[in-house]
Amino acid sequence: MYSINFINVLNAQVDSHLMGSKLPTMLSLMDIKKWFSETSKSQVTDSTIADILNVTRKTANKRVNEGLSADDLIEISRHLGIPPIHALVELGKLTPQEVFDYLDGDGTLLASASVDQLLYHLAEESLPLSARIELGIKAKMLSDRKDELAARRAKKEAEHEPAPEPERYVAKTKQVEPSEGDDDFGA
């Protein structure tokens, strides 16, 4: 899925980031059009970029020279069949550490994770299988107990509900005798 070159550059950038040094990104060493061409295995020119971004060739050239925005990078990458994350890291819009933080947390950043997600991840990473099984059994018992309490409360509320009052208005069921002038009189 990822090219060996991309992984090597990403690892080098993470290492340099952790060591505090500033390593230039691949795109600062190489022309962006050349990078898109090599990565997509097709020639990418200002005209290609202009067509993808729906702008003039002059505008596309200016954007490339000034540095493409993240939105432009994503649009170009998707059109060329390149995962946008590659270009975002290569251009420096995302740091490798940001990518790893996102991927390591199953898509949830540590800063935005809930307490439950943090506890679950901590238990999953640090507890042996037997302890996780035991923890799961205890959680199931607690859940069942909560369900049992809810059922008891519902039953108790149902027992204390007052019986419905009898209806005040009931239809007459008595037959009325026909009187003089009715069609049924004397029949």
Image (spheres, rainbow, N blue to C red):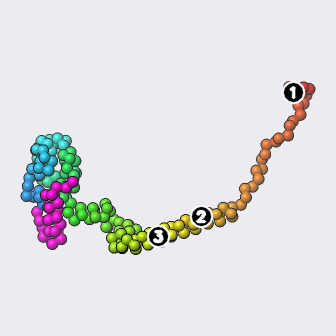
Q: In which quarter of the image is residue 148?
A: bottom right
Q: Do the residues labelled 3 and 2 touch (CB within 8 Å)?
A: no
> Viewer-proximal residue, 145 or 65?
145
Q: Which of marks 3 and 2 is nearer the N terminus?
A: 3
Instruction: Name the secondary structure under disc 2.
Output: helix
| Residue at 71%, 60% in the rendered image | 162
Above-or-below relation of 151 to 81: below
Q: What stretch is highlighted in magenta?
A: 1-24
Residue 70, position as x, y percentages in the image: 21, 54
Give amino acid for label 2.
Ala
Q: Do the residues labelled 1 and 3 touch (CB within 8 Å)?
A: no
Q: Distance between the residues labelled 2 and 1?
A: 60 Å
Give amino acid for label 1.
Asp
Q: In the image, which is nearer the foreground, mark 1 or mark 3?
A: 3
Residue 119, position as x, y percentages in the image: 38, 71
Q: Is residue 100 one of those drawn in magenta?
A: no
Give amino acid for label 3.
Ile
Provide the major secondary structure of the magenta segment. Answer: helix
Above-or-below relation of 136 to 79: below
Label 2 sits on residue: 151
Q: How far apart are marks 3 and 2 (CA)?
A: 21 Å
Q: Which of marks 1 and 3 is nearer the N terminus?
A: 3
| Residue at 8%, 52% in the rendered image | 31
Residue 100, position as x, y percentages in the image: 24, 63
Instruction: Name the secondary structure under disc 1.
Output: loop
Numbered badge on residue 184: 1
Label 3 sits on residue: 137
Residue 133, position as x, y percentages in the image: 42, 70
